[in-house]
Image: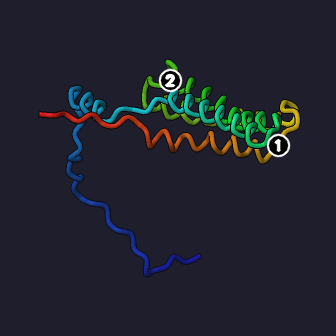
């Protein structure tokens, strides 16, 4: 196959590029950045999912009068809550913050564990929940998943210094 003569390759620069203008932060500057941007605890999200799941299960049972609907909604929320708790435990563990590489690998590993656990819980649902209602289970599942967005909306606000 013949090469296209109209395409040319740009020449390599003869002089090395100037040093990057990005400077690492000092310990004091890093501390100040952390203070101004407080992190959101994953346990706060898990607690929110538990609260929303319980409330949704009780409301589902109350509105329909069927206990099986309440259990289905609750189990749907649990299919998000339990894997999220395992994920949060994995991310807050001792090895998660050794360095950036272990943090990235840990995040991906625990995310895969979370997905597999959610899938396993959904597969087991018909055997564990008597009178399972799939629509009610999906309502609980979706409501618990949406807590992530609500948690972001109510995340700790940056501290402001008053002079």
For the residue labelled by badge 2, is the local secondary structure a helix, a strand or a loop?
loop
| Above-or-below relation of 64 to 159 | below
Please give the label number shown on residue 52.
none
Report the quarter where the C terminus lies. top left
Q: How many marks?
A: 2
Whether residue 120 is visible, yes or no, is no
According to the image, what is the colour scheme of the structure?
rainbow
Q: Residues within 10 Å of mark 1 (few under 14, many from 20)?
A: some
Please give the label number shown on residue 133.
1
For the residue labelled by badge 1, is the local secondary structure a helix, a strand or a loop?
loop
The outermost residue toward the top is: 94
Q: Position of residue 130 (x, y in %)?
A: 87, 33
Q: Earlier in the sequence, mark 1 or mark 2?
A: 2
For disc 2, the marked residue is 92
The foreground one among 123 and 106 is 123
Q: Position of residue 63 (x, y in %)?
A: 74, 42
The foreground one among 1 and 19 is 19
Side of 155 where 23 appears, left or right: left
Instruction: Please report the residue visible at 74 percent of the width from the left and 34 percent of the height from the top.
Output: 75
Q: Residues within 10 Å of mark 2 (few under 14, many from 20)?
A: some
Instruction: Please report the residue visible at 53 percent of the width from the left and 40 percent of the height from the top.
Output: 148
Determine which quarter of the picture holds residue 161: top left
Instruction: Please report the residue visible at 24 percent of the width from the left and 31 percent of the height from the top.
Output: 32
The mark closer to the camera, 1 or 2, is 1
Instruction: Using the numbered discs, state the Cα–Cα distance from disc 1 to disc 2 in whole angstroms.
Output: 35 Å
């Amino acid at each position: 196959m013949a090469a296209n003569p109209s395409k040319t390759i740009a020449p390599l620069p003869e002089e090395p590029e100037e040093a990057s203008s990005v400077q690492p932060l000092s310990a004091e500057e890093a501390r100040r950045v952390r203070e101004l941007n407080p992190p959101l605890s994953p346990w706060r999200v898990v607690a929110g999912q538990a609260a929303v799941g319980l409330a949704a299960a009780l409301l589902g049972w109350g509105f329909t009068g069927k206990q099986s609907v309440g259990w289905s909604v609750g189990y749907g929320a649990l299919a998000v809550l339990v894997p999220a708790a395992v994920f949060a435990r994995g991310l807050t563990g001792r090895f998660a913050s050794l360095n950036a590489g272990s943090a990235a690998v840990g995040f991906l590993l625990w995310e895969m564990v979370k997905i597999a656990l959610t899938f396993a819980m959904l597969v087991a649902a018909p055997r564990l929940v008597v009178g399972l209602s799939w629509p009610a289970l999906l309502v609980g599942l979706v409501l618990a998943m949406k807590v992530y967005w609500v948690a972001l909306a109510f995340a700790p606000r940056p501290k402001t210094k008053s002079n």
